[in-house]
Amino acid sequence: MKRLRKAIPQFEAEMFREILANEGIEAKIIPTKIAFFDSVYFGIGAMVDLSVGDEDFDKAFEVLEHMTGERGKEEDDTTEEHGST
């Protein structure tokens, strides 16, 4: 798994996951590892990471880049393994 987005609001990650699913890409929402930004403190507004399979990363990045206009891939920890949602 590669991290596609880091420390984004959970509602945003849910939206991105649905968009990617419509493109045939499975994405996983993983609780972020930043202290005090988890669901214990923020509930549904918690910060999360969005990860996709290694083979889908480039396509997923292009889909979200086209939609959001953002540039630049997450460079740090892109190969970090994550569990399921």
Image (cartoon, rainbow, N blue to C red):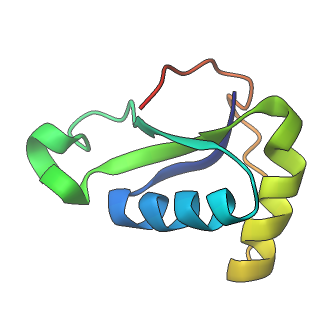
Give the residue drawn at x 34%, y 50%.
47
Q: How many marks?
A: 0
Q: In this picture, is 85 found above or below 6? A: above
Give the residue drawn at x 68%, y 28%.
77
Left or right of 10: which side holds 54? right
Horizontal and vertical percent position of residue 53: 74, 33
Q: Quadrant of residue 32?
A: top left
Q: Quarter holding the C terminus?
A: top left
Q: In this picture, is 76 found above or below 47? A: above
Horizontal and vertical percent position of residue 61: 79, 58
Depth check: 63 or 35 in front? 63
Give the residue drawn at x 49%, y 19%.
83
Left or right of 10: which side holds 63? right
Horizontal and vertical percent position of residue 16: 56, 64
Can residue 71 be seen here? no
Depth check: 37 or 60 in front? 60
Left or right of 65: which side holds 49? left
Depth check: 5 or 35 in front? 5
Q: In this picture, is 11 found above or below 53? A: below
Can residue 11 be seen here? yes
Horizontal and vertical percent position of residue 58: 89, 50
Q: In this picture, is 47 found above or below 70? A: above
Q: Quarter holding the N terminus?
A: top right
Q: Quadrant of residue 31?
A: top left
Left or right of 76: which side holds 35? left
